[in-house]
Image: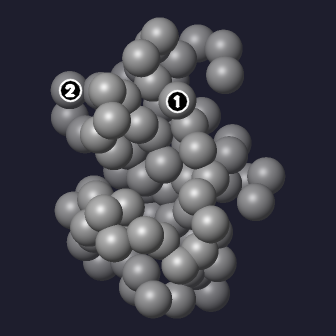
Amino acid sequence: MPGLPARVRITRPPLPLAPALERAAARLCPGAPLDALNAAALAIAGGAVIGAALRWQGGEALSVDTGWRGRGIEEALADALAGA
């Protein structure tokens, strides 16, 4: 995706999330009902999940680690989730 830092990639993993991805999503979006997700998009840099956009019936959550904010990742996550 254009505009993202070189090390960052956006992925839409299959649901339910694998345990490691679920833990990362819970850390980034603690209020999200991870067992009821309809869609998820994750930002990954250097093998670590640095951002998550999650959607479930009646709600959405989007969060990016502090050091990565403002680099176009939020927009890329929102776009990936919108395409889900």
Q: Residue at x 67, y 22 (%)?
A: 1
Left/right placement of residue 19 relative to residue 17 reads left
- Where disc 2 sits, the SS reads helix
Q: Amino acid at mark 1?
A: Arg
Left/right placement of residue 13 relative to residue 32 reads right
| Snapshot quadrant of residue 13 | bottom right
Left/right placement of residue 57 relative to residue 23 reads right
Viewer-nearest residue: 19 or 82? 19
Q: Amino acid at mark 2?
A: Gly
Left/right placement of residue 31 relative to residue 51 reads left
Q: Position of residue 80 (x, y in %)?
A: 68, 46
Per the image, the residue denoted by label 1 is 9
- The answer to whether any part of residue 54 appears in the image is yes
Tell me which numbered mark, 2 or 1, is placed earlier along the sequence.
Answer: 1
Q: Position of residue 61 (x, y in %)?
A: 45, 64
Task: Tell me whether circle 2 and circle 1 mark residues in contact (CB < 8 Å).
Answer: no
Q: Residue at x 79, y 52 (%)?
A: 83
Total number of numbered discs in the rendering: 2
User: Which colour style is shown?
Assistant: one colour
Per the image, the residue denoted by label 2 is 67
Q: Residue at x 73, y 54 (%)?
A: 82
